[in-house]
Image (cartoon, grey):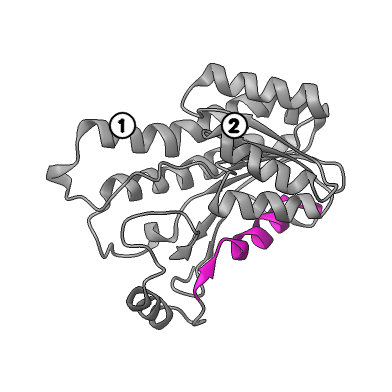
Amino acid sequence: MTERVCIITGAGQGIGRAMALHFAKRGLRVIIAELNGATAAAVAAEITDQGLKARPITVDVTDPERVRAMVEEAHQQFGRIDILINNARWTGLAPTRVTDISDADWRRALDVNVTGAFNCVRAVVPSMIGAGWGRIINVSSAAVRLPPSRPYVHYITSKAALIGMTRALARELGRHGITVNALLPGSIETGVARPNPVTSKERQARVKVAQAIPHVLKSVDLAGAAFFLASTEAALITGQSIAVDGGTTFG
């Protein structure tokens, strides 16, 4: 895996940051793709200060032109793209009943969580096909497997769509040596501010009871699973949706 190049969207914080650090420490060159340029630069500096390789790129994944520019910049900097992790998501979603979801919120959920991933895949696939090797990992959610405890139809719909995208892409791209899989994190402490954060003691207790392994998930817990799926050892794993949720869901 040394010297391979990985683009991680939404890598300025939370799960994306944890993955970026994990991959960089194992010799990969990491593109910190993030809407917030300041946080992207901070994570890249955190990596390069350790003598490792990273480059921040400010990008809005909903903008196809900006995504194409990001991919071109990555090629100019490192000469290749081997791995794409679609981790960017809209963090502004709050539990909302279907009758109260605004048109703008519905569109934003799908634009960032689904269309953003599609834009990135479309931009990187030509170089992966040319190389005859590639790894694409879509970060969905274990919430798509559970009866919702809160009204979250916009979020769950967008994350379920990523699983369908994963399966379709796996079938289409497998003959080119490209695998496509989805990671489904459970209730996780990312360090990113959000409504009803998992950091509350009451919520932590509920999460532990629901899981087979009573451990509050943290961003770093996703990084190892992502690294395995991105590795040569996972060459024959594709089209799969793998939950990292402490055993809240099975199957």
Identify the amino acid type marked 1.
Arg
Estimate the x, y position of residue 181 in percent, counting from the top left. Answer: 60, 49
The residue where tag 2 is placed is: 121
Estimate the x, y position of residue 80 in percent, counting from the top left. Answer: 80, 29
Residue at figure coordinates x 31%, y 56% from the top left? 195
Asked if residue 225 is among those painted magenta in the image, a careful observer would answer yes
- As drawn, the label of residue 172 is none
Report the magenta residues as a range: 216-232
Tell me which numbered mark, 2 or 1, is placed earlier along the sequence: 1
Foreground residue, 63 or 229?
A: 63
| Image quadrant assignment for residue 240 | bottom right
**Badge 2 local density, few (<14 within 10 Å), some, or many (20+)?**
some
Foreground residue, 240 or 16?
A: 16
Residue at figure coordinates x 25%, y 31% from the top left? 104
**63 is higher (above) or lower (below) than 40:** above
Identify the amino acid type marked 2.
Val
Mark 2 residue element:
helix
Left or right: 56 as drawn, with respect to 79:
left
**Is residue 239 in sight in this rendering?**
no
Residue at figure coordinates x 83%, y 46% from the top left? 52
The residue where tag 1 is placed is: 107
Mark 1 residue element:
helix
Residue at figure coordinates x 48%, y 22% from the top left? 63
Of tags 2 and 1, which is closer to the observer? 1
| Image quadrant assignment for residue 194 | bottom left
Foreground residue, 213 or 240?
A: 213
**Badge 1 local density, few (<14 within 10 Å), some, or many (20+)?**
few
Q: Distance between the residues labelled 2 and 1?
A: 20 Å
Instruction: Name the dominant secondary structure of the magenta segment.
Output: helix
Estimate the x, y position of residue 206 in percent, counting from the top left. Answer: 35, 78
